[in-house]
Amino acid sequence: IDPLPASAAPQPARLIGDTPRGGSVLSFYSPRGAARPPRVGRGEGVWLWDADGRRYLDATAGAVVANIGHGNRHVIAAMQAQAERVSFAYPRFFESEHNIALADRLCALAGEGFDRAFFVSGGSEANESALKLARQYAVVTGQAGRWKVISRDPSYHGSTLGALAVTGDAHTQAIYGPMVKPMPKVPAPLSYRLPEGHTAESYAMACADALERTIEQEGPETVLAFILEPIGGLSTGAVVSPAAYFQRVRQICERHGVLLIYDEIMSGAGRTGEFLAAHHWPGARPDLVTLAKGLAAGYTPLGCLLAPARIVDAVAGAGGFVHGHTYFTNPMSCAIANAVMDEVERLDLVARARERGVGLRRRLEAVAARSPLVGDVRGLGLFSAIELVADKATRRSLPADFNAPARLTEHGLRHGIALYNRRANLGAFGDFQMITPPLTISEPELDELVDRLGRALDDLADEVVRRGLT
Ligand code: PLP
């Protein structure tokens, strides 16, 4: 069945995505809740079918995960082959050929400055590992006074407590703030709504300067690292900053002996048209990089920290990394990620993300020209977003409690398109919808995507008028 009949009788309001208060009522699978999303049946390529056979285009690759699409036969065969050999062997007793192969491969893809890989189960764990490796490096190199990790506001680095300490989100801080060590924040260079008198470029440079001021105020000898999403996902909605911003940030970090960490959990693994988003700014290499999501593309949970030998070897030489998880360097997960990376190479998906990104951008700009609700289109490669607004001329957002992204998801499901979103800061910096399909998407499927998206936006626009929100 394809897709839900557009004329289907209006369904009772369901709570899809976040509630207006920024939480999810779906996570605990309460059997009592009437508000349920469709139950997934199967997936193939860019498509997901629900248990009733309805088809949905996976326009965001889930949570920016399914980079090689669903149902890939090569990966499924590799999963089965590895499961038949051994699915778990604790890495402190046994190494696995897949761990080594994946580490070698990722370091080669990441390029100069990356010689070691540490595998964990997801993005938050990868960031925890980065923060802890940076800290232990400081301790073993006589810089134990360095512990503060500066990050940006808004930003998203994960949901565990360490990752939350560096996440710039007033809403989550209001709940969990007392449980985490407060860490200094500097503004993220947003590009759509700017302070008076600034262009996107001048504001980005002002944000870089704020980093240096903050390091100096905090005392450089106390500052361990600066962590940022080179292109933000849930936090900024695919804002691409000018190269000069990254260069200045790199220089500032260098000047003050501060480690630069790129959280590439969404932007990495090829999505932006380079294997790392960092590769777009070769003069501004980070010291540490974290990956997850597209790395194993949803076939298994996997995250990774990439680091230079100088840092890892210093820590190893001083007794080893005091950090680990039961599932670190899991051989099953590494085998699967190797098979995913085989497909990324065989199908030339990094180049494809770059090329298809051009076509997606052109189509989204046409959507924006038609829809009264789309105020901006931005991104790089197949990492893009549209800004949802009440008024294009004034760039005013829709009311926060309307929860436009959740409403768009709801309308999207009725038009056979799955649109993931999660509002950072309860929409305080505006609302956007990520558009991040699998990198395998074809040109005709891009047409389908924008057609379905356009219909969902039309329904949202009708709803906005009906509720008198313009
Ligand atoms: N960092 C970024 C930039 C993310 O987008 C995410 C997840 O969306 C995370 C970290 C956390 O990853 P995970 O949800 O796998 O723990």
Image: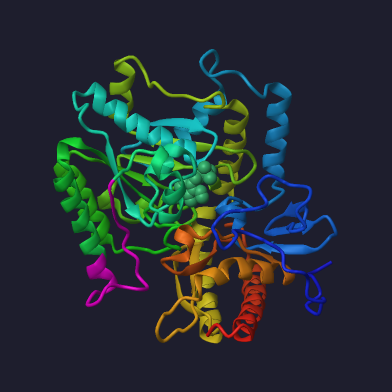
Q: Report the number of numbered marks.
A: 0
Residue 439 x/y as whole percent: 57, 57
Query: Is any part of residue 126 visible from this angle?
Result: yes
Residue 155 x/y as whole percent: 40, 54
Residue visible at 23% across and 55% down?
A: 247
Q: In the picture shown, does residue 401 fall above or below 142? A: below
Residue 179 x/y as whole percent: 42, 38
Query: Residue 133 is drawn in which quadrant?
Result: top left
Residue visible at 68% across and 28% down?
A: 82
Image check: 242 left or right of 10? left
Q: How is the image coloured?
A: rainbow
Image check: 446 left or right of 180? right
- Segment colored magenta: 184-203
Query: Residue 209 is drawn in which quadrant?
Result: bottom left
Residue 273 x/y as whole percent: 46, 57
The image quadrant where one finds the N terminus is bottom right
The majority secondary structure of the magenta stretch comes to loop
Q: Is residue 195 magenta?
A: yes
Residue visible at 22% across and 26% down?
A: 144
